[in-house]
Image: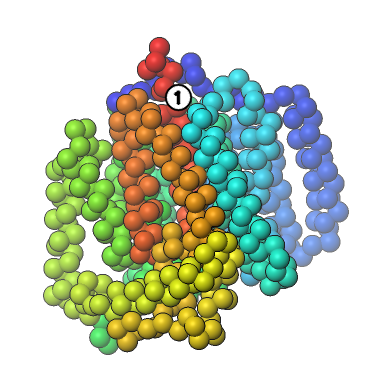
Amino acid sequence: MELFSNQSWTADVRPSGTMRALSWLLGLLSLLALAVLLPMSPTPVGIAILGGWILLIWVAISFIRGQFDYVVLVWVAVFPYCYYFFSYPAERAIFTIDRAFIVLMAIELFLMSRRTGATPLTRDVRISAYFWGLYLLVCFGSIAGHPVFDVLGSYRLLLDGMLLPALLGLYAVRLFPITRNLSKLHGCVCVLMLGIAVVCGSELLSGKNLLPWPGAIETWIYNYDVKILRVDGPFENSSVLSVIGVVGFFFIIYSRRLIGSSLTSTQNLLHGIGVLASLASALMPMNRGLIIAILVCASIDYFAKAPLISRSTWNCLFAALFFVAVFAKLLYPGVFEDRVTSGDNFYQRIAQDVQTSEVIRDHPLMGVGFNLYSATVIGDPRYAVQWGGFEAMNVPHNSLLSVLAEEGSVGFLLYVGGQLYFIRAMWRMRKVNRLGWQVFLYCILVYVIFGFDVGIAYYSDLNLFYMFVLGIILQIQLRMLPRVES
């Protein structure tokens, strides 16, 4: 399925003279600051400043040459580790690589979006963007009346988890030059998944969280007298890890199908490693909701006329999952009971959904405020809910109910409307490339179905990767459309 042999529609994103002059001006100002700070800094700080300066020079050169896509590719391969090593301060970071990256990307998007070669957006995509913009305004309005320092965490989450992913998705659709970068992007996602799998495997064997997220709580599964860490890799929690692993799994296979036979033997080896690593990363946290989401996608793909994954491969995967379940039942009965047969988590989730429903009933129109659910219910006897002997967790465990409770019916309609129009845009182009529509649908289904079990709507690291992948898939479909129509 080699669909990219014709490079005639590669985006022309060469820099203008104004942009080049601005980049050099910023570089000179940064060099002046470096000359002042370096002599005054201790040796470790000086080394860090030099490293940052080298990175800044490289990014500036990429900007000047119109090669910002190289920065994007590097970000894709390493972004989870940046939270641990490059956030300052470590607690409640002001500077993060993601924020700096998206700021640069927004400048690129603003300067280049009107130039020849940028992917035109369909009407449905534009309507989706309008809905999302209105939803962000509702989120902002829901916390604007509170003291700033009381809801500072909500503002951070709104910026990192909802606004920045939308901008990255827009860039992925409009400007990322996918025709010359598809094999590179495929390789970067494989490298990303390999690194994640190595971290997860090391955590599972050592029983230690190697890259702890600030404020994150470790979770364990007990096999009677032995406890096993539910790994989260370089992410905030195991739910983010699972969804990113599955989305990466689908994208690696899809991009490999598009590239065709042009990969070298080394790239083919990396592809195989990336597929196994992404699947292992997704399954290691032992999330039951994820298994259900994968089974739904597998059921659709298994009976598709042109499946993304061959039926024999699905059979092998089902057999492997069955073997692991039997193995766990025999050797780790406590783990099997906790993850499969125990009803404790089920009852607790019912209690939580009942509590969330009561919050929705009391605040039907505008909700309790973005990310203010826990602050609303904790300590309020009206929301002390039990089911089957288990108390509610005071945290929504359902993405849609979380939005409905915190932003009300107004925010909920905008949130759902933005996503439905985004899906509709892809649905209308499904005949251009059925495989593209299928993998797009599978990513959506995993995100939505798993979101019914675990609230994942606001996580920044997940939403950034998720929106970037969906944007790339949609751009490929949009780029194929003129060729098919002609």
From where the camera sits, is residue 281 visible?
A: no
Residue 147 in picture, x, y percent from top left: 73, 70
Quarter of the image for the C terminus: give it.
Answer: top left
**206 or 347, nearer to the observer:** 347
- Name of the residue lying farthest toward the top: 486
The answer to whether residue 438 is above or below residue 388 is: above
Residue drawn at (34%, 42%), measured in percent from left and top? 441
- The residue carrying mark 1 is 479
Quarter of the image with the N terminus in it: top left
**Residue 72 image point, x, y percent:** 55, 41
Residue 374 higher or lower than 179, as above or below: below
Quick one: 329 or 170, which is closer to the camera?
170
**Image position of 183 (left or right of 435):** right
Within-10-Å neighbours for mark 1: few <14, some 14–19, many 20+:
some
| Secondary element at image label 1 | helix
Please give the name of the residue rendered at 44% of the width and 18% of the height, measured from the top-left corner.
482
Residue 480: x and y, percent?
A: 41, 23
- Residue 273: x and y in percent read 31, 47
Horizontal side of residue 475 vs 445, given as left or right: right
Q: Residue at x 34, y 74 (%)?
A: 350
53 horizontally vs 167: left or right: right
Coloring scheme of the render?
A: rainbow
